[in-house]
Image (spheres, helix red, strand yellow):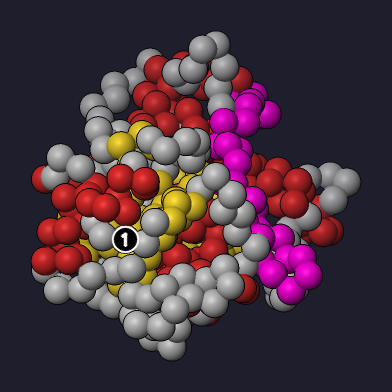
Amino acid sequence: MGQPEADGFEFPILIGDIGGTNARFSVVMDAETEPGEPQIVQTASFATIDEAIRAAVVERLSIQPRSAILAVAGPVNGDAIPLTNCPWVVRPKGMLSTVGLGDVVVLNDFEAQALAVVALGDRHLEQIGGGAAEPDASRVVLGPGTGLGVAGLVHFQGKWIPVPGEGGHMDIGPRTPRDYEIWPHIEPLEGRVSGEQILCGRGLVSTYRAVAKADGKPHPFTQPAEITGAALDRSDPIAEEALELFVTCLGRTAGDLALVFKSRGGVFLTGGIAPRILPALKAGNFRAAFEDKAPHREMMASIPVYVITHPLAALAGLGAYAREPSRFGVETAGRRWRG
């Protein structure tokens, strides 16, 4: 395959989205070709990421990648990168020899989600209110799933620059009289309630329990899917209120982040939960909470919110970066290893 240009990558390029339960891989063969068929493996099936890559890509596809761009949950510091909720430790320097790579870049998983915002077309976006997005305006990506991921995306000098952060750990507090009844029963983390204590799978369970405890009612459900299912089919009033509060808090937090970035380019909801609760997100209280930001209601009403419905959005973002790195301002200092 051809040599890379300047700061580009030599093809074939392995791209990977590494989660706690599953690792998703694909290969980009050249700059004109979309990523190949995704290879999804369970992390528990392999002792190391190196073994998973060899089995899922090198052996199964009979492809020897020359470069790799990997997205992992958590900050990338140093040559040994531990993964959240998974015993794997990514050792990029070692992968140069064990996997036969010449170039490895490791990014934060929500940087990949931010890159996907540029890569995905309208067919993978479901709009919830607001007007038209301004093409080169700032954007925000917000992802309730196992945790609550947040990233920004800004356009500068012709490049899209992802801005990773830990916005999922911002404080979130009560506003209404009903909130004040429920909040004392939400499980705090070291004495405070952050966004991630509500806006993720375990957070939804905690919210459901808190609503039940506030009213002295039983709370038999223990899984997020049970709660969302009972709420959406209107078979359990406690689950309904819990999901409504979840959606309201998501709207408040998304609105706060839209203010931080002045994201006239849109706010994008990704992760495992948002696509599954589209009816609840469209019901009205999400958008009302999003826009309830006096003195900026008018601006907020104009900002569109989108739910990303692509099942492998992070891979799409990594694929776009692999094929056309000059389009993005991704900082690789301290996060790129070459043989």
Locate residue 181 relative to residue 272 in the image: left or right: right
Locate residue 286 relative to residue 113 in the image: left or right: right
- Residue 69 lies, in percent from the top left, at 41, 60
| Residue denoted by label 1 | 101
Kind of residue at badge 1: Leu
Q: Which of the pair 126/68 is nearer the observer?
A: 68
Residue 314 found in image quarter:
bottom left
Categorize mark 1 by other alpha carbons within 10 Å: few (<14), some (14-19), many (20+): many
The N terminus lies in quadrant: bottom left
Q: Which of the pair 8/31 is nearer the observer?
A: 8
Q: Residue at coordinates 75% horizontally, 46% vertically from top-left?
A: 260
Is residue 264 in view?
yes
Locate residue 18 relative to residue 32 in the image: left or right: left
Q: Residue at coordinates 35% horizontally, 55% vertically from top-left?
A: 17
Q: Which of the pair 309/236 is nearer the observer?
A: 309
Q: Which residues are magenta?
A: 150-179
The residue lying furthest to the front in this view is 339
Q: Residue at coordinates 30% horizontally, 45% vertically from top-left?
A: 94
In this rendering, the answer to whether 202 lies above or below 256 is above
Give yes or no for residue 278 being in the magenta stretch. Answer: no
Give yes or no for residue 152 being in the magenta stretch. Answer: yes
